[in-house]
Image (cartoon, rainbow, N blue to C red):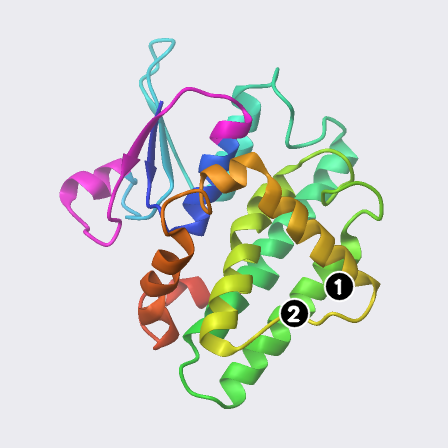
Amino acid sequence: MKFYCAWYCPFAQRAWMTLLHKALPFDYIEVDPYRESSWWLRISRGRALVPVIVQPDTAGRGETTVIDSTRIVEYLDELAPGSPPLLPGDANARAELRFWLDHVNERIVPYMYRFLKAADAGTERDASRDALVDGLQAFGEAISPSGRYFSGTDLTAVDIIMAPFAYRIDVLLDHYRGFAPPTRGEAWAKYRDWYAAACELDIFRRTSTDLPDYRERLIEHYRPYSDGGRQADLTQTD
């Protein structure tokens, strides 16, 4: 299996964490997704975005290419059903978990980027900050009161989908916007405990903070974002 990644990308980190969690063999291929060569456009199915998983032909059907980080997490979970599952087997529980996957992708991620990219103080920056806080608070309220992870004692896809962005909220928004999540209230206490547990995960550290000078390199990489540059599509909401 080939895994196309960019070290700084939180979406790619989701896939990387899942590959390690599922103990799947893979070839790590670092790419610059901003270089839209014909080769890269072909590999990424015309999207020029990481992550991309390419599974070789196993039954005469040709290779399988999977894009989109959430879809990749689900695909890898199905690919290795014998390892610790990230999505519950029960249909109702799985539907509830997918609601929170969508919540992270639609109510947290875009507003994190909007806040980061709002170079000038004012209404736009304030609105994006407030929307981000609302999304984080709802996430915190939904965290199980027992266990270390979102759903309790077992790691799920929600933990993997959210962890890379929680780290960037902590590091990048503090550095560039002087922002820290609120601290008062049960939801925020649960969020702090969840975030601490997420940062201690071996699969999180191996794909981020254990890498040389990761925090400093990440801050520098996102400097153009803090000035209002880079990908506009990251700020889009439905």
Q: Locate residue 105, reporting x and y percent.
A: 56, 55
Give the SS element for disc 1.
helix
Q: Locate residue 176, reporting x and y percent.
A: 45, 74
- State whether residue 23 is above or below residue 208: above
User: Which residue is depicted at the point 52% across and 33% down?
Assistant: 18
The residue where tag 2 is placed is 181
Q: Is residue 167 magenta?
A: no
User: Which residue is depicted at the point 60% across and 55% down?
Assistant: 104
Kindly identify the amino acid type of the residue bearing the numbered disc 2: Pro
Mark 2 is surrounded, within 10 Å at the Cα level, by few (under 14), some (14 to 19) or many (20 or more) other residues, namely some
Q: Locate residue 127, reporting x and y percent.
A: 58, 81
Kindly identify the amino acid type of the residue bearing the numbered disc 1: Trp
The residue where tag 1 is placed is 188
Tell me the quarter of the image containing the N terminus. Answer: top left
Q: Which residues are magenta?
A: 19-43
Give the SS element for disc 2.
loop
